[in-house]
Image (cartoon, rainbow, N blue to C red):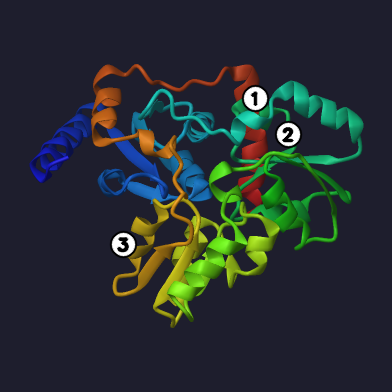
Amino acid sequence: MAKQTWADCNEKIIKLKRELDAVIVAHNYQRPEVQDIADFTGDSLELARKCAEVKSKTIIFCGVRFMAETAAILNPDSMVLLTHPESGCPLANMIDVSELRQWKKKYPEATVVSYINTTAAVKAESDICCTSANGVEVVNAMPGNEIIFTPDKNLGHYISTKTSKKIILYPGFCYVHDRITTEHIKQAKQRYPGAKVLVHPECRAEVIELADAALSTSQMVYYAKQSSENIFLIGTEEGMLHTLRKYNPGKEFYIIASSSTCSDMKKTTLETIIESMETGKTVITVPDEIRIGARRAIERMLSIN
């Protein structure tokens, strides 16, 4: 896309925002130009909080479907538009309500903690939600000693190392994080000796063991700001590099694995934002019978952290 086209798109988006009384929110994994046009960027926890507070008539959500569902659940008075109709999440699709109910029957005494990366229906069937930023706090706040954690086994395992509770892991995973290997880290360290290694807790246990810290995307920004180090190796979706560089000018950030791209996160472009705003065809709605239970699980999470 030529620079003039960027400018034209940005001007059109700003005009449509006024017409729709809209606010644009974008996840940290979005394309750089999408992050830059947004009013707010952040991780799942930050965006959930922000969407709950929005007073605008319209929320333009640059992310994937479960995130837009969360916005619609928390703010039913606003119209939520997803910026690409097919931007889903393979991790969220690894579990459905029928599977979760089977697990609940198998472990009837366990509390169900579901990662925010789940469908609204799965959230409604859960006791509480969590994000990668507050998963440990949520699990430790739950009554009882047995937790069914869905759907990300890697994040669940990471949490299990930070709690005395028994964590029963559902076998889902994020393909972007799961394919980061120890060999990727070793090779990156050879290229940038002495660099700090920051990885997402959705990574495999052996990858986390080689890292200096396992952090959510918002926590990575804070860590880099507070650190006296200047070079960082990043183990998460590559869109995070733009966020880190934006908030940490003068510091260097490099992706650990070149394959760390989420194809669904990259479906949103400036053109698809405009299309969603002009046509209104990507309105995200959650039926009340699901929304009420899902909202309860999300609000329980927000009340803890």
User: Residue 35 at what x, y percent from top left?
Assistant: 32, 47
Q: Point out the tag, 1 or 2, that comes first from the N-terminus.
A: 1
Q: Secondary structure at mark 3?
A: helix
Residue 178 in the image, given as x and y percentages of width and height: 61, 49
Asked if disc 3 and disc 2 are in contact, CB closer than 8 Å, the reply is: no
Residue at point 85%, 55% (across, down): 165
The reply to whether residue 269 is in sight is yes
The residue shown at (60%, 36%) is: 91
Whether residue 137 is visible, yes or no, is no
Q: Is residue 105 left or right of residue 129?
A: right
Tell how many labels.
Answer: 3
Q: Which mark is residue 126?
A: 2
Q: Nearer the viewer, residue 72 or 220?
A: 220
CA gap, disc 1 and disc 2: 9 Å
Distance between mark 3 and mark 2 Cα atoms: 36 Å
Instruction: Identify residue type, mark 3.
Output: Lys
Residue 125: image location, x then y, percent: 73, 28
Q: Which residue is mark 3?
A: 246
Residue 189 spot, x, y in % from top left: 50, 73
Tell me the quarter of the picture where residue 134 sits: bottom right
Disc 1, SS: helix
Against 179, residue 61 (above or below) is: above
Does residue 200 appear left or right of residue 232 in this picture? right
Q: Residues within 10 Å of mark 1 (few under 14, many from 20)?
A: some
